[in-house]
Amino acid sequence: MQIESTIALISINATLIVQLVSFLIFLFIINRIMFKPLDQVKGSRAARMEALQQEIAAAEQEVHRMMDALAAEELKAKDEALGRQKALEEEAKQETSRIFDAVKAEIDQMKARTNEQVKAQIADVRQHLPEESLKLARAIMEQTLERSLTNETI
């Protein structure tokens, strides 16, 4: 009888079982040392990122709320300033009207005083006018006649 030997790529014997057990032990150790801690770090980072995203969303909402409040305050301040401006304009119009009326009254008083002065001057001139006209007529006649006149000749 002849022994036939075949060379196989994989031979099932004790070394294969030892290698398989060694590989399983290696997988268990690497899982405990490397994969689980990495998975935990990955999970904690994901949780931290989620918390940060929630904080960012809350901060954005707070910013929007503050911007809305600021816009409302700005609108309120503009309305208040417009109201104050209108009140000041109305007050200025009233003050202008009051000053204008006072100046108009003063002008009327000045006109009345001036008219009285003019009337007084006219009355004074009218009172002295006959006397002055006689003097003037006498002077013209004396020059024309080239002689001195007496009061009785006029």
Image (spheres, helix red, strand yellow):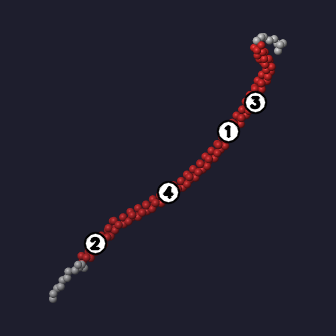
**Residue 73: where, in percent of width, then height?**
58, 50
**Residue 21: where, in percent of width, then height?**
28, 74
* Secondary structure at numbered mark 2: helix
The quadrant in which the N terminus is found is bottom left
Q: CA distance from mark 3 to mark 1?
A: 24 Å
What residue is shown at x 49% (from left), y 59% (from top)? 57
> Residue 29 bears which disc, if any?
none
Q: Which residue is mark 3?
A: 112
Q: Which residue is mark 1?
A: 96
Q: CA distance from mark 3 to mark 2?
A: 130 Å
Q: CA distance from mark 4 to mark 1?
A: 52 Å
Q: Which residue is mark 2?
A: 22
What residue is shown at x 81% (from left), y 11% (from top)? 150
The answer to whether mark 3 and mark 1 are in CB contact below 8 A is no
Counting residues from the start of the chain, the first of labels 4 and 3 encountered is 4
Which of label 4 and label 1 is nearer to you? 1
